[in-house]
Amino acid sequence: MITNRLSGALLLGASAVVACGRRGPPAPPPDAGAPPVEARSEGGASPEVSRVEREGLSIAFELRPLNSAAARPGARSDATAVFTITDAATGAPVRDLSPLGWMSRRAGAPLDGPACREKIKSYMAGLLSVRPEVDMNAYLLWTQNQDNTLSVINPQIAFNRSKLRSIVTLASGSASLALHPDGSSLYVTLRGGHGLAVVDTRRSLVRANVPVGAGPTRVEVAPDGRTVWVGNDGDGTVSVVDARAASVLKTLRAGAGHHEIAFSGGGRTAWITSRGAGVVTAVDTATLEPVAEVEVGEGAVSIAASDTAGAVYVANGARGEIAIIDAARRAVSGRVAVKAGVGAVRFEPKGRFAFALSPGTGEVFILDGATGALAHTIPGFASPDAITFTEAYAYVRNLGENRISLVELRSLERPGAPAVVSIPVGEKAPQAAKDAALAAPFALVPEGNGAVIASPADKALYYYVEGMMAPMGTLSNYGREPRAALIEDRSLKEVQPGVYAATVRLGDEGVYDVELLLRGRRVAACLEATVAPSAAPAADRAPGPGLTVEPLFDRGVDLEVAKPATLRFRATPRGSAPPLEAKEMRVMIFRFPIGSRDTLLPRAEADGAFSVTFTPPEPGRYRFLLEAESRDAPLGALPSVDLHASAPGAAPASGGAR
């Protein structure tokens, strides 16, 4: 279990100040640019605001619909949960509070002080038996696996039960992935000519497969989130994709060989390497036109840019050097000799020091961006191949041993050798897994003081917190090899001074208790929110789900393990509602009672039916569930259908999918 985000909140106890609030007049906005927080109007069209004052703080809460056409957020819709916290005396915004928030459907009277405190404590414990309808502190762990799947894991759940939230099935195996800055989409390059997969992270579904060039490998999202850049190693091009429309805006010629991509000037310039052509191409990201080609020599394997240093560093494995490009002049300003076979190069967060990894010699070279000179050479690594940074440390993976190495960043500015500590991780070296070298194995936790580390050979993930000499916990990847990992942060963030917000998926209509904990102030408050009925027409909304489902395969069908099976079904809307489209639905098939889950996007068929293709990973009992939230049919609202999978040759000849 990963509970570091909430562990500090366990200090909540008898000494914590607890306040319970109900609807009241709005809190003053923190500044002129903040969205107005209005009191409920007579007609109920304005957002309802719940407010409480305690310990000198004025705390207001409201739900704002994401759909601008909706007057109030409705049941099972997406909304923005907003806390506005100000000084009760002056109205000044109160910043840097790191709040935790939840919503739970009210079953009786409003929560009093002790009940509010106990409810928050139960949430912080991560118990599956006590879960809120809405969690504003969530983060999910995504893993890129050795097969054609992505795992979605909730690392904050306790109990010895499955933490696996979903499995996303891709059209083929994947090469690399990148998360959109707002966390809404994940972009994955696919092997075998399948292009770029665009994954909706909120629904855990592939929403588009974008045709790009041949052999797409590296993918990067521009800092402004508008474009996605895909290096096509098979045809010497880079595809620039519109992040929202999921369509190719332009295809750039970039030279032969593998491509790496970096951005400088706040994202105004993209820099593209070509291992075979020996040039780095600079592209204006506004016009998508190349503006320069810089000769660096054949063998460029990695690139990193620093606006602090005003430079772009290119690691050239064949020449054993780091080429330094002046970002303003777009010309090579220096070359630093290191060792042949140098690989990844990355700048630490402040942008001064660049780390260059040398897997062949077991060394890490550190260059000072202020001078362009080699500042440190650190030996003692075992094929270092991947690196990431927190504010305090560089995390280096050792491909040849089951350990990571932490380099203290503060020590880089002191005389002498930098401080390095080794942390054992797992039982097997990453290189024991096939094709582990292209991975990005570190997922930094939102607190910024640790990481989840993917161990493909162990088929597990390890949670490390800085200051410890070993990982604090382990997460299973359920038999799959995690090649890369990243964290999608869905927690409350300070979007304006004193305004903390998160996008949430609401539950059923009704009155909810809103539980809030301000960890720094040790103040707990319980407020109130009302979720309106769904905006769907009443005739089509009630009673129950807005559609019926008829399986066109035998109930209890016996499938064969590792053999794809097509499962067909009809989905019929109720009343006068328009026909369903495939994009409105998703199917989840999970191993019952606990085990793997596959989330599948249905296909429309010529006869009006729909189908999904499911490949059982192991023998056992499975359940087929259909979800269509736009038709008031959330997951679990429609009856499930039982399936069974047997080992090859063990399934009966009769029956089956059709």
Image (cartoon, helix red, strand yellow):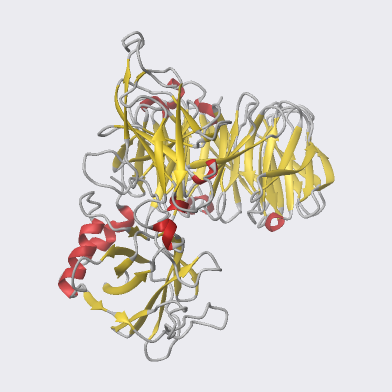
The answer to whether residue 67 is visible is: yes
Query: Which quadrant, please, contains the C terminus?
Result: top left
Most extreme residue toward the bottom is 89
Vertical position of residue 481 compared to residue 105: above or below: above
Residue in front for this viewpoint, 97 or 343: 97
The residue drawn where x is 31% and y is 20% is: 619
Residue at figure coordinates x 38%, y 51% from the top left: 545
User: Quarter of the image holding residue 510?
Assistant: bottom left
Q: Is residue 467 above or below residue 275?
A: below
| Residue 212 versus residue 541 in the image, above or below | above
Tell me, yes or no, if residue 259 can be seen here.
no
Q: Quadrant of residue 339?
A: top right
Residue extending furthest toward the front: 575
Q: Is residue 629 left or right of residue 370?
A: left
Image coordinates of residue 331 in percent, x first then y, are 82, 46
Q: At x 54% / y 27%, what residue is drawn?
A: 173
Residue 516 coordinates in the image, percent (x, y): 31, 69
Question: Where the N terminus falls, by quadrant?
Answer: top left
The outermost residue toward the top is 649
Q: Which one is in front, 342 or 625?
A: 625
Residue 155, x across and y down, in percent: 34, 45
